[in-house]
Amino acid sequence: MSLSSATYTDRDAMRPGIRVLNLLLLLPLLTASINGLDSSLVNGLQILPAWQAYFNHPNGKTLGLISAAQGLPFTPFSADNLGRRPTLFIGAVIMLAGVALQCSATTIGMFIGARGLIGFGLTFVLGAAPLLITELAYPTQRGKLTAMYNASWYFGSIVSAWTCFGAYEGAGRSTWSWRVPTLVQAIGPVLQVLFIWAVPESPRFLVAKGRESKAASVLARYHSLTGDEHDPLIMFEMAQIRHALKLEREAARDTSFNTLFATPGNRKRMVIIVFLAVFSQWSGNGLVSYYINLVLEGVGIKDAGTKAAINGGLQVWNLVAAMSGALLVDKLGRRTLFIISNVGMLIDFGVWTLTTALFNTLDNEAAAKATIPFIFIFYFFYDIAYTPMLVAYTLEILPFNIRAKGFAVMNLVVSLTLAFNQFVNPWALDALGWKYYLVYCGWLIIELVFVVSYIIETKGRTLEETAALFDGDQQPEALMHQGGEAATMTMSRNLSTPRRAGPGIWVEQEKNVVTEVFPLRDTSPKRESDHSMATSIVDRYDEEVRSAYSHTPIFEAL
């Protein structure tokens, strides 16, 4: 096969396979929306008089129990042994059983039990879907897709908020005003149960299970421009996956949860992951995300319709902010966005606390009205980093052999902090009022110090190369060598200029010998003799890839 037949510069030739892949990835992407709808549901139901009356006005402790119902982290065992797709399917089926029980609940105990069953199923879905997206996505799109995954949480929260508003306006005090929103929760799991088998399995999982031919077939179908398993890009990806798995198995022959803390690099990863998981729930966002009813009543807003409208508008605003953050991930970088987010939240929450205090101590109506826009501003800063990047950053810094287990730990920590936070929040708001906000002001200072001190930039690196930031430089150099060597063996050497082997993927050729492959890297080769060649590659990369592809909508093939 000639190099010219293996490389393309026509963007139209790049689109079909990647476009189909992105359409298929909408199904696991739907998971975050399912989570958003589930997480926002109790928040919306609290506003509805019919729900309050039917369940005899649940108090703070009962509300905390409802929100804190969670499943156990069985996901990594299922995801690593059964596969990403079967794990997602199992979780969706369990969720449907919980939704049926929730919609037909006649007692608060039955409702809480249904919430627990839904939470258990959701654990499986949340643990499998991001892995599938990360390991299937085309290399140049992985960052945006994984960031957009968590950002799409707000699609679900918007549906939940406005369904509750519509049900309140349409059904009033009928029980259908709360049963309809709970029934809507079944839509996402139904779609996943019906269509998940159309999505290919993770190539990394397939290689790990010895099914290399199937993995190569998946990559060729959705990543190659020709559908050829011997395409240089496919050979490069397969070589990197094989070598990464080999290195990881050598480092941990018997992978268990202890592996997460077995090396300095892994311990550093877990410290960052655990703290970010805690920050995602303890930044003050839990006050509004789950108890907006109490927060709004704290500044004198009592009307149910007004509260429902504010809640619905906030979810739309959150979606815009989160998607903006997702699209800025590859431009500004992860660390920069985290720092901007934490600085903004700290300043805004301080002002929010002040306006709430003025209303409660001096009955200042102007301060009460000012609180609402500061809630929106606070969420803008939260959403640009923690919504799109909690999942994306976690998956980026975890190598394959501990990715499922590390991700399960992140979800478990989120669940535990959420359980604690949501049990304490309603009680503390009742007991302390606005003074409880001071606790979050202090905590946000701690968050900012941690983010500045520990968050590492991963922008512009493949999943395998990111390991260098934690485990040293030898692993990624070996991966690059293996990938380049594999690609070299598949191509005839009959051209004298670097060519693109795929969208954003460059192949270097020197003296009729292909010597290097550059995936997502705008760094030059190490050899001095390649200086002029590398300069040409970088120039063309900047001009043709960054400018031509960076601003293309994600569901157009780059």
Image (cartoon, rainbow, N blue to C red):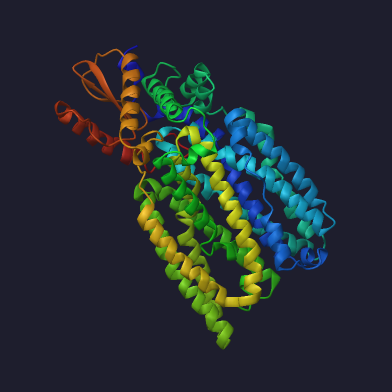
Residue 204 in percent (x, y) is at 49, 27
Does the image show residue 222?
yes
Q: Which residue lies furthest to the bottom in this view?
A: 362
Judge by depth and name the residue closer to the eye, 473 or 176: 473
Q: In which quarter of the image is the N terminus?
A: top left
Quadrant for residue 432, please give it.
bottom right
Residue that appears at 61% across and 71% down: 295
Does the image show residue 164?
no
Judge by depth and name the residue closer to the eye, 289 or 475: 475
Residue that appears at 52% across and 29% down: 254
Q: Is residue 259 depicted above or below 110 in this figure?
A: above
The reply, left or right, for residue 494 in relation to residue 504 is: left
Judge by depth and name the residue closer to the eye, 117 or 322: 117
Q: Quadrant of the C terminus?
A: top left
Q: Is residue 50 depicted above or below 14 in this figure?
A: below
Residue that appears at 41% across and 35% down: 463
Judge by depth and name the residue closer to the eye, 15 or 443: 443
Residue that appears at 51% across and 79% down: 355
Quadrant for residue 314, please give it.
bottom right
Residue 68 in percent (x, y) is at 67, 56
